[in-house]
Amino acid sequence: MGQLIEVQYREIGDVALFDTDRSITGQDSRVYRGPSPNDDPPSTLATRLFRTDGSIDHVHVLSNTVSIRRRGGWDDASLKGARDVIASLFVVYDEDADPYEPLREANYNATIASIRAHNEDLWVMKVMPDEPIEPFDAGQYTTLGLGYWEPRADDAVEDFDDEQRRKMARRSYSVSSSIVDRETGELEPEHPESVEFYIVKVRPDQEEIPALTPRIFTKGEGDRLFMSHKFTGRYTLRGVEPGDKVVFLSTGTGEAPQNAMTAELLRRGHAAPILNLVCVRYNDDLAYIPEQKIVQEKWPNYRYEAITTREPENEGNKVYIQDLVRGGGVEEMLGGRLDPEDTHVFLCGNPAMIGLPKWEEDSPVFPEPVGVCELLHERGFTIDHLKTRGNVHYEEYWKDR
């Protein structure tokens, strides 16, 4: 019951002004720096705004104007979220209705377009944003989010107060790609309408209760969630020349950006050798095998290899990517030498595999045990560092949540 308020807004730096078609305070000015215990209209409005968006730190209500300050400024999603909270101030919802639906409407800006569940813990999921996608580079990542109010797909217990439960769980995910369409065998388009993600459900352990993926795995096609409109990251094909050999080394869902960059290379007509090597625990942790077979059949310069560590045949004979780099297995798969003069190596996944160094001025200090970065450094490769673009590239985050 109750009518929506008509709201117009404009942004001035960190402050946004929302003009309404009715008075909320009369001629009295009301200022809030946090949720209010009062239940009059301006206090109720301020409390809803603070609880909906944790970056809001100041609300001023005067007659039919609401001035809101937000740390870090405003974007389209936050402006529309605040507008929707104001618009629904006088709407009374059915007691049986979901009390968190207004939060979904205020925070979610995308729809799950499709889910290919490879198994109960591993999905290839496509997300359709409400607004058109700005072009981005293969290998980059964006952010997905769901409210803490959403149910979990496990029995983990989270001790939240009401304020925390109204906030969002967010996590960065590299954009993935199936490379080709399973039915037609054609390359995926460069700028699709939906964005693909390769997501594993992370289970709780003694050290951490994952926040996001157990909530994603309760969702289905057509359900709503948050996806940032910004895509970012330096893990891209910048600097790769048409004649360069390209080696992608990954573990688990670290395959995601490698597949996106593979698709981009093939769209470019890259003719030099491309190797995509992924290490997983079990064969069932590989969700792209059908697509990879199609790609290898159509592009003879491309090779996909997967190794496992926990299948029965691995007992007492585990082989990791580091072993294949050290022992020449990667060069055999590539069909050529790992030569820093004409080879780019991309690393995404387990930090132990990558072996990213710390730096003392311009000198790398490598961790134990030995990772791929150290093995390649010994061969004359240059690791990306600060503004220096080398020929060993790495993704800067790990552990999808």
Image (cartoon, rainbow, N blue to C red):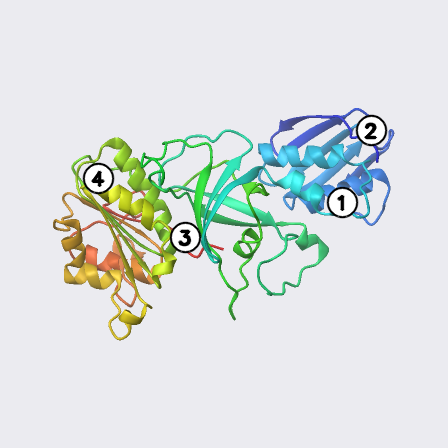
Residue contact between numbered discs 1 and 4, judged by CB atoms under 8 Å: no
Q: Nearer the viewer, mark 2 or mark 3?
A: 3
The residue shown at (39%, 53%) is 253
**Which circle marks residue 47 in the picture?**
1
Please name the amino acid that badge 4 sits on: Trp
Which of labels 1 and 4 is toward the front? 4
Assess whether mark 3 and mark 4 are in contact (beta carbons under 8 angstroms).
Answer: no
Return the residue nearer the eye: 278 or 300: 300
Callout 1: helix, strand or loop? Answer: helix
Residue that numbered label 3 is attached to: 397
Q: Quadrant of residue 269?
A: top left
**Residue 63: image tag:** 2
Tell me which amino acid carries mark 3: Tyr
- Of 76 and 179, the residue lying toward us: 179
Residue 189, given in percent of the width and then of the height, sits at 37, 32
Numbered mark located on residue 299 in the image: 4
First in residue order: circle 1 vs circle 2 = 1
Mark 2 element type = loop
Q: Could you tell me which residue is drawn at 47 percent across and 31 percent down?
A: 133
Residue 84: image location, x then y, percent: 70, 34
Residue 308, compared with residue 19, is above or below; it is below
Q: CA distance from mark 2 to mark 3?
A: 47 Å
The answer to which of marks 1 and 4 sits earlier in the sequence is 1
Mark 4 vs 2, N-terminal side = 2
Q: Earlier in the sequence, mark 2 or mark 3?
A: 2
